[in-house]
């Protein structure tokens, strides 16, 4: 198991040519610690585990690893299905000004079409993600100030990765001195 910076994992996902709407995610607060846990997976790509925290409002730091090479029958029920209320997406910045203008035009047209006709929220989300060329998006189970049960089950399933990533993230937090209050 190779622990990497969370940005590197997202860059790999962004460069993958897998169907972008096949991803699913579960996220929530870390168990009694600063930061969040995120598992996200795709049936043919595998399952990733990220641990992150906000060093400050503009700097998210974290670590992660791939914990499974595919989402199999054992892992599938722990990830949300299309009926889940939440959504997530990974996005890459446009390559240059021309690409940004092209994306903006597609996005404007997508929103115009949806504004003029009855639309389903899921269809709007999918069409917007396609317009901005999101490499990964899908349903997400997320608790802002808690942990979904599936997050605990995944953490228990990948206990070795949980311990290693917790240790690595705790080291980052210690180095950044963000675990101390001030007055």
Image (tube, rainbow, N blue to C red):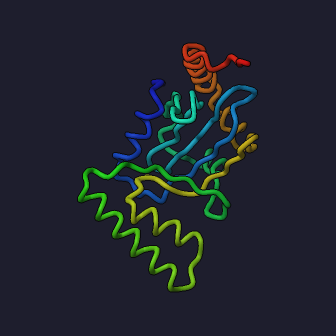
- Residue 33, given in percent of the width and then of the height, sits at 71, 25
- Residue 149, given in percent of the width and then of the height, sits at 75, 43
130 or 24, which is in the foreground?
130
Which residue is painted at 45% across and 24% down in the image?
2
| Residue 59 versus residue 21 in the image, above or below | above
Report whether residue 52 is seen: no
Residue 32 placement: quadrant: top right
Which residue is painted at 64% across and 31% down in the image?
35
163 left or right, relative to 138:
right
Give the number of marks.
0
76 left or right, relative to 99:
right
168 or 92, which is in the foreground?
92
| Residue 103 versus residue 45 in the image, above or below | below
| Residue 116 versus residue 180 in the image, above or below | below
| Residue 33 versus residue 21 in the image, above or below | above
- Residue 164, given in percent of the width and then of the height, sits at 58, 20
Report whether residue 110 is seen: yes
Q: Of all residues shown, which one is farthest toward the front?
A: 183
177 left or right, relative to 91:
right
Residue 148 placement: quadrant: top right
Which residue is painted at 53% across and 66% down in the image?
125
Placement of the C terminus among the 4 image quadrants: top right
39 or 58, which is in the foreground?
58
Residue 132 placement: quadrant: bottom left
40 or 30, which is in the foreground?
30
Which residue is painted at 41% across and 44% down in the image?
13
- Residue 137, given in percent of the width and then of the height, sits at 50, 55
């Amino acid at each position: 198991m190779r622990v990497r910076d969370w940005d590197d994992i997202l860059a790999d996902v962004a460069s993958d040519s897998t169907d972008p709407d096949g991803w699913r995610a579960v996220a929530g607060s870390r168990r009694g610690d600063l930061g969040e846990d995120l598992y996200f997976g795709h049936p043919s790509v595998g399952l990733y585990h990220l641990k992150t925290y906000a060093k400050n409002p503009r700097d998210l730091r974290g670590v992660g690893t791939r914990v499974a090479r595919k989402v199999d029958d054992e892992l599938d029920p722990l990830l949300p299905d299309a009926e889940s209320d939440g959504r997530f997406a990974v996005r890459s910045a446009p390559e240059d000004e021309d690409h940004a203008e092209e994306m903006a035009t597609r996005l404007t047209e997508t929103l115009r079409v949806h504004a003029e006709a009855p639309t389903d929220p899921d269809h709007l989300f999918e069409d917007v993600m396609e317009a901005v060329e999101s490499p990964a998006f899908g349903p997400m189970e997320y608790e802002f100030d808690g942990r979904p049960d599936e997050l605990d089950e995944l953490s228990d399933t990948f206990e070795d990765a949980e311990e290693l990533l917790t240790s690595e993230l705790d080291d980052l937090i210690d180095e950044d001195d963000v675990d101390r209050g001030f007055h």
